[in-house]
Amino acid sequence: MVCPFCGNTAADGAMICPVCGRLLERNEVREEGVMAIRQGRRAQEAYAQGRSPIPSENTENRPSAPDTPEMPRYAGVPVIRDETFYGLDEMPLRPGRGDSAGIDRPVYGDMTGSMYPLMPKTWTRAERRRMSRHPANWWKISIAAVVLLMFMGIGVLVFLNRTDMGQRILARMGRDATSMAYWEIGEERMDVGDVDRAILAFERAKAIEEAEAEENTAEQNFNVSGLLMLASTYESTGRIADAEAIYTSLYTDIVPTATEPYANEIRILEASNRLAEAAQLMMTAYQNTGQTSFRTQRNELLPRAPETNVYAGLYEEKKYITLTSAEGFDIYYTFDPQASLPEEGELFEKDIFLDEGIYTMRAVAVNGQLVSDELSAVYRIIMPSPQTPRASLAPNTYKQRQRVRLWPGEENMNDDDITIYYTIDGSLPDADSPIYTGEPIALPGNYSDLHAVAVNRYGKASNTLSIRYKVLAKPYPLNSYSVTDIGSNLTLCQTTWDKFREVYGEALEMEETHLGGMMETCQKRIYSWGYATFYIQSGRQLLGEVYCTTSLIHGPRGTDVGNTEDEVVGKFRDMGQVVSPSGNRGLYENESGKGAIYVQPDGGKIIRYTANTADSHKWQLTYTLSASGTVTAIDLLYIP
């Protein structure tokens, strides 16, 4: 038969190849019975004698392999190499044991678990050379070990970076890890009382979350419970400001609806006696969380809001408002919607008077640094207006002197509180105009305008009644004062200093002053009889004012110091209007100017006329009268 390993021919029935020494595979049926026992005994004896169990005659007939090295032997038994299991390594064989067929077979090393010890291996020089040509197995082993180490390293990295336990290990080492790992490590350290290292872990976790929030603003995830632990830890170590910063950040930016940050911050504020801030935060907490406990807590802390004796609403009469505090605290109020209370409010000390109008009043009670909620009230004081008064004389042209009666409108006929103010000097009536007492009003000659208004007890005025009459009966009123009226050849805005000095000489002294709304400095020259003021225009000094207390300078239309009231008034226009309750009397008012008499506190009077100039300025002529009724000074003034 042919050896399937080396290709040499072995005798039929042989079990071992005579060349390579390997077991031969046989397809034929194994010998049984006595034949098998004999074959086994024969093979065993051959091994014991150090010879091949194959008959010599068959060996002679078998062709031998060229250059076949001598088979290594141990005690006369050839060593068989099994490259199937060991590659180039060759294990020594021990004497075999018979199989079931009674045939002795060689045993490979200790692979069968035999009780025989391994036999020493004897290598030939050729075998050593052959083995040295095949060192690749050691490289494979080394590469396998490196690959194994690499996989083990990758596994460790995956474990550290992908698992919660691995992240906690990195956090304990102070390496980069998730914020959750640092929160957990911080909590572990807190449990064992290591507060300082717990704070470091919490701060590291907080910094990681803040960095992640900056990188991804669309989604910000913060560990609220962890931040609360950090703030609580800060408090326990006395770092109150740091704890407040965390609480403020929580209820301001992170979780405005959570109650715990508000409660903790309120506790800190109350402990530090910052009660005003605590009250404000209580209101914010109630608005954001809806927890009524915050509102109740705030109501117990703050003083009660002020109360008023007049409820907000619509009234048709003037009101006096009284503010009170149930606890007796100071009250500050304002009608300015932009004012800040109590800083910009006014301390309530007496009743507040409300005239007609719309008022929005706000008030607070103050107890030290605690400020109550605002009392807010809107008052609408809209008093009814009387009807326009009526006149007994229709507007028309009359050839004889006329008198006019006035009375209230039809709806106010039975009102006893209606007052009618009127004028016939051309001005519109006001509180300083004559009051109609029922006495008929005498109209002057020529054209005259009657104006009248009705005022009720609320001070509400009606629309103005205006009627023009023409009475063709003398005497007619004189002309109004105008810029053509001059005295002592002195003309305002035209007489120069040089011309004035030629007549009146040098002044006793001079001082700088201003005239009306002039920005430029004027020169006031003082004389024994009064003074004259000059202003500069186009390089010339022009007369702006002259004041005289003697007869040295005469007034317009022959008036002079020492004249009586009637002598002066009789020179200018007078519509015959009676005096007002204050004692003043209007003389006239039209497009040319105005004339009036004003009572002075010392009992004297002033007769004053104004005249409009072509360039929209005014001249003013004033006569000062003593209490005896005579003129003591005349003043002629240019009003720019």
Image (cartoon, grey):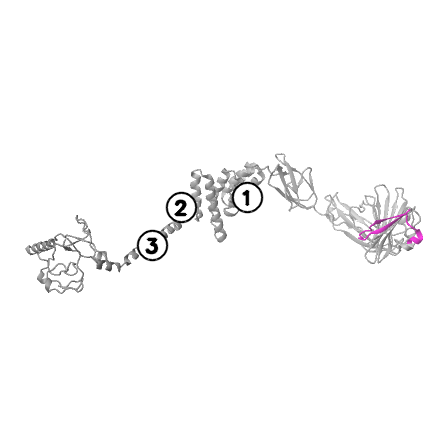
Where residue 469 sits in the image (x, y, percent)? 82, 54
Return the mark for residue 169: 2
Q: Secondary structure at mark 2?
A: helix
What amino acid type should be assigned to the residue bearing mark 2?
Ile
Name the residue rendered at 22%, 58% in the picture. 125
In the figure, residue 599 lies in which quadrant?
top right
Where residue 148 sits in the image (x, y, percent)? 32, 53
Residue 462 visible here: yes
- Of callouts 2 and 3, the N-terminal one: 3
In the picture, which quadrant includes the N terminus?
A: bottom left
Residue 414 shown left or right of residue 230 in the figure: right
Residue 559 shown left or right of residue 212 in the figure: right
Distance from Cα at disc 2 to Cα at disc 3:
26 Å
Q: Nearer the viewer, residue 47 or 341?
A: 47
Magenta run includes residue 503: yes
Which segment did they paint magenta? 500-527
Identify the residue position indicated by label 1 in the image.
284
Identify the residue position indicated by label 3 in the image.
146
